[in-house]
Image (cartoon, rainbow, N blue to C red):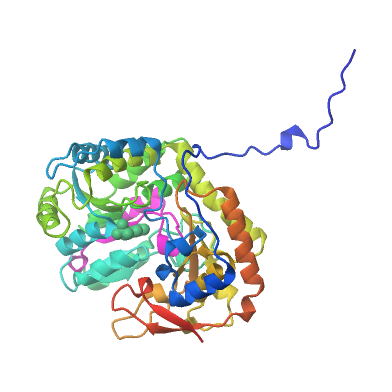
Amino acid sequence: MKHQRHPLAYDSSELPTSWAEPWKIKMVEHIRLLPHDARQQAIATAGWNTFLLPSSDVYIDLLTDSGTSAMSDRQWAALMTGDEAYAGSKDFYELERTVQEVYGYKHFIPTHQGRGAEHLLSQILIKPGQLVPGNMYFTTTKFHQEYAGGVFADVIVDAAHDPTSTLPFKGNVDLDKLANLVTSHGAERIAYISIEGTVNMAGGQPISIENLRAVRAYCTQHRIPLMLDATRLVENAYFIRKQEPGWGDTSIAAIVKELCSLSDGCTVSAKKDGLVNIGGFLAVNDDLLAEKARALVVAFEGLHTYGGMAGRDMGALAVGIRESLEYDYIRARVEQVAYLGARLERFGVPVVVPYGGHAIYLDAKRILPHLDQETFPAQRLAAELYLEAGIRTMERGIVSAGRAPDGSNYRPALELVRLTIPRRVYTQSHLDVTSEAVARVCARADTLGGLRMVYEPEHLRFFQARFEPL
Ligand SMILES: *Cc1c(COP(=O)(O)O)cnc(C)c1O
């Protein structure tokens, strides 16, 4: 007897092939959505600044991917065997070996987090008045450069300032801008060039190997050191493998090492790619530079074999660095971000393209075109998302950019709200809820007014500034 095959609703050649997270959940953390009136009270108490909300009042926390990763069972196991000796912890040596192997630098100096490493590097390499060119700026990086007397100079490609440009490597350096700067000021007035992997402030945009090679060649010719901010270099490596011609078959580990080989050293916040909740380091090739850094680290961070980290944290970081290089992991991480971006675009929400490695950025200028930049549209939009659905995001616009030396507000071209995805923490359902909440806010955007700043701290004002609705 012949059996009739059940008729399928699709042609099997058209069936999509989805990917899934290369992990399953072993422990859960409860979250809850406060009622609307409680959220209203919470944001007013927080001065309309999402940084000032208690996390217990937050439902889905997309403030940052910094220190918010879920550690693996292997990392938790490393915590339990951490060696808390003041000097010479076994976990220091394990981490040192890992950093030397993965990133390829000769010297490793642990710090409490990324800004600790930036502080040491800036104090050692920058003479007052010197310029520090970079592919856009990062808040703490620029702060430490200026604190050491340096002057930041932006040499990123123009496309990075255009949220609608779909160029694949918007983190690239504009070599003409760099050459003009060096020619007009002289190479001796350049402290070093500071290159960030997946440029956070540009929307998480990567730099290509081809571009970094050209920058390196130029710097070598003019004897200018090249320092990497390797905080999100693994995510940058994923983009290179996915979209830079010739790298499609290369391992993520080999691409990371290639990028580092084009520099003299790096600073790292281990709270991002490193898959730990706290930590950072400075790694350099030059012996004298390392000696100076070890002299400073004991004054500002801790002994040179812990630099502010507990032994167990160094152990967990060594495991986290290796896990971050696994292709299945980094693909799921970056593609989860793209999933959120694609859903938002389907709802017609203006976002920065291409999608970043760690976050999706809402274009507040296009969502709230009726608000003047001096009334903080992105700050308002971030607060509104909390009011709408208990979702916490952050402003990346005029508040974050701070003030120029003459006291006026910098007016950055980009006025964005960042939806940052913690690593291995949220499921696609959380991102579905998020995208729908953003769409609802956008639908009533014309009813939203601006804010005025009622308290402004002296440094890095976005963390603690307070606002009131106009
Ligand atoms: C987070 C971050 C830093 C600063 O690191 P912390 O660990 O927060 O001190 C520096 N650079 C980049 C690109 C970052 O994302």
Q: Quadrant of residue 459?
A: bottom left
Q: In the image, which residues are magenta?
A: 187-216
- Residue at far top of view: 1
Foreground residue among 24 and 259: 24
Foreground residue among 326 and 158: 326
The picture places residue 233, in percent across and down from the top left corner, at: 37, 49
Q: Quadrant of residue 119?
A: bottom left
The answer to whether residue 264 is visible is no
Q: Is residue 190 magenta?
A: yes
* Rendered-image quadrant of the N terminus: top right
The picture places residue 347, in percent across and down from the top left corner, at: 67, 62
Task: Report the residue at 31% width, 70% height from top.
Answer: 153
Q: Quadrant of residue 342?
A: bottom right
Q: Is residue 225 left or right of residue 273?
A: left
The picture places residue 408, in percent across and down from the top left corner, at: 35, 85
Q: Is residue 285 left or right of residue 9?
A: left
The picture places residue 2, in percent across and down from the top left corner, at: 89, 15
